Amino acid sequence: MPSKKTPAEQLRAGRSPGRDSGGRVVGAQASTIGCPHAARKLARANRILDDESMAIYEEAIFRIEVQTPHYDGGYHGVPEDWEDIAIVENAINGVVPPELQLRASALYDLIERSAPGE
C-alpha cells in the first residue's frame, strides 16, 4: 500500500493540500473560500452532510473566514473579536458530526491566555 505524501512532497510535485491539480484553491471558483484550510473543511463536509446542512456549514465557514486575518504562506492570525467566532462555532458544532466541528475559538482563547502580559 503506498504511503500518503506529506504536504512538502505534494508541494514539490506541484500540488499542496487544499489545491487542485492546477494549483488553484479548491472551491475558489465559487468565490466562497478564503483559504486552502477552509476549502479542505468544505470538501470533507460535502462528502458527509446533506444539502441543507452543507449550506449552513458553508455559511459558518464563510463567516469565520471573513473575520480571520490571513497572511502570505497560508498563515492565520488571531482576530480581534474571536468571541464572535466562538458563537458561530458553538451554533454549528451542535448540528455537525464530531469530525466536522470547528474549534478555532478555543485555540484563540488559549493563545490569549498564554500570551505574556503587555
Image (cartoon, rainbow, N blue to C red):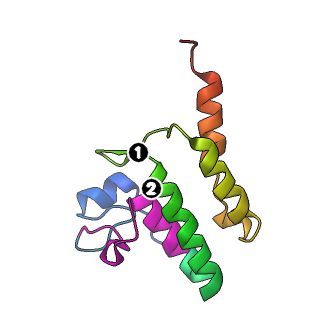
Residue 61 rendering spot, x and y as whole percentages: 53, 63
Amino acid found under the numbered disc labelled 1: Pro
Identify the residue under disc 2.
66
Can you name the residue that lies furthest to the right here? Answer: 94
Q: Is residue 49 visible?
A: no
Q: Residue at x 49, y 38 (%)?
A: 78
What percent of the width, then of the height, locates residue 25? 32, 67
In the rendered image of this protein, does residue 1 appear above or below residue 36?
below
In magenta stretch: residue 29: yes
Q: Measured along the vertical axis of the image, is residue 27 above or below residue 79?
A: below
As drawn, the label of residue 106 is: none
Q: Residue at x 46, y 62 (%)?
A: 38
Asked if the magenta segment contains residue 58, the reply would be no
Badge 2 element = helix
**Disc 1 designates what residue?**
69
Q: Which residues are magenta?
A: 23-44
Q: Residues within 10 Å of mark 1 (few under 14, many from 20)?
A: some
Q: Tell me if residue 103 comes above or below residue 111 in the rendering.
A: below
Q: Residue at x 77, y 65 (%)?
A: 94
Res. 28 image quadrant: bottom left
Give above or below for 80 relative to 74. above
- Examine the image and state in which quarter residue 92 appears: bottom right
